Amino acid sequence: MWPLSFDCLQKSLLKTDEYLNVPSFPKTLLSANFKEFSQWVVTYKLLDINLSRYSDDALTIYLAQGKKRFNRLRRVELVTQFFRRPLELWLAYDRAISLQEAVYHVQICTFCDTHITPRNLLIQASLKYPNAVQ
């Protein structure tokens, strides 16, 4: 939520609509407060933002905006979960067709139970005519 909140903050203070990607950050920052996290991003990204003139309370508006965006993102992710397996199957079938068109014999199977890993598709391909000159 904090990276999304920081994005709201930087958009407001820098008067921009461009998304600013927040890099991976030390997890110790999560035990700090939002202002310290924001200061770390400002320093890391070399942004022209002076956070010292803002109190923690003044930054709560950006935390609320970030929380709203985070909740919306989670709802979208729930919808995408429904389509994950059909998309994986489509991709595997598409790759299998490409291999068949390149003169391979192709089989698609699963290599383990879905409770071990849901990404359990295996594409096996072998040349139809292994001794043929290509």
Image: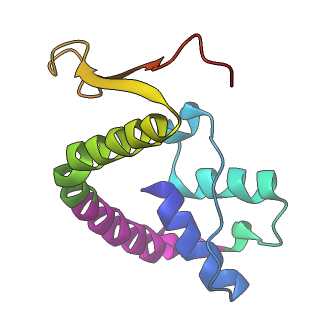
Please tell me in which quadrant of the rendered image residue 28 appears: top right
Q: Residue at x 47, y 35 (%)?
A: 99
Q: Residue at x 52, y 55 (%)?
A: 34
From what the image shows, is residue 75 above or below residue 97? below
Residue 4 position, x and y percent, is 49, 63
From what the image shows, is residue 39 above or below residue 97? below
Residue range of the region highlighted in magenta in the rendering: 54-76
Q: Residue at x 22, y 63 (%)?
A: 75
Q: Quadrant of the C terminus?
A: top right
Colour treatment of the image: rainbow
- The number of numbered discs placed on residues in the rendered structure image is 0
Q: Nearer the viewer, residue 115 or 44?
A: 115
Q: Nearer the viewer, residue 51 or 93?
A: 93
Quick check: 117 left or right of 62?
Answer: left
The overriding secondary structure of the stretch rendered in magenta is helix
Q: Nearer the viewer, residue 3 or 13?
A: 3
Magenta stretch: includes residue 64? yes
Q: Residue at x 79, y 57 (%)?
A: 45
Magenta stretch: includes residue 41? no
Please tell me in which quadrant of the rendered image residue 122 appears: top left
Residue 132 position, x and y percent, is 60, 17
Q: Nearer the viewer, residue 31 or 120?
A: 120
The residue most toward the bottom is 15
Q: Quadrant of the N terminus?
A: bottom left
Residue 41 position, x and y percent, is 70, 54
Residue 29 position, x and y percent, is 57, 39
